[in-house]
Amino acid sequence: MEVDVRYVRSGGVSIAYQVVGDAETDLVFVPDFCSNLVYGWESEYWRPFYERLARSFRLILFDKRGTGLSDRGGASRPWKPPWRTCVPCSTRSGRRAPSSSVPTKAV
């Protein structure tokens, strides 16, 4: 699978993201500690996981601010919940942005 990394501006920095699959339902995968969109596809662990998700969903992957291919930004930036960082990615892709009331735990 070819890695097509795109960028969107959020709070003055560029956030790297990728959209994989073409299913009707979006799934935004929020990485935990750190990520890298290029190296994730080279991983024997992450690649099969991403491919399985992309068969059932339109998978949106992104590198959080300061990780992977996204800009580092200023150190004094206020903290944002992870799903707020990905809002520009989902709106850029032509879908409705997720609500800010997204649960923090899987249900």
Image (cartoon, grey):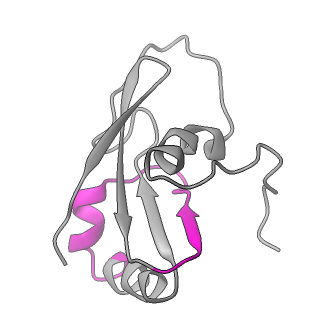
Residue 79: image quadrant is: top right
Quadrant housing the C terminus: bottom right
Q: Residue shown at 50%/20% (left/top)?
A: 11
- The picture places residue 93, in percent across and down from the top left corner, at 44, 52
Q: Residue shown at 37%/63% (left/top)?
A: 19
**Residue stretch rendered in magenta on the structure:** 23-46
Quadrant housing the N terminus: bottom left
Taking the view exactly as shown, the residue that stands out farthest to the left is 2
- The picture places residue 91, in percent across and down from the top left corner, at 53, 45
Taking the view exactly as shown, the residue that stands out farthest to the front is 94
Give above or below for 15 relative to 45.
above
Give above or below for 53 relative to 17.
below
Which of 48/54 is in front?
54
Residue 57 belongs to the span the image colors magenta = no
Q: Residue shown at 38%/23% (left/top)?
A: 13
On screen, residue 28 versus residue 92, left or right, reads right
On screen, residue 9 versus residue 103, left or right, reads left
Give above or below for 17 relative to 7.
below
- The picture places residue 41, in percent across and down from the top left corner, at 25, 71
Residue 41 belongs to the span the image colors magenta = yes
Give above or below for 39 relative to 94.
below
On screen, residue 40 versus residue 93, left or right, reads left
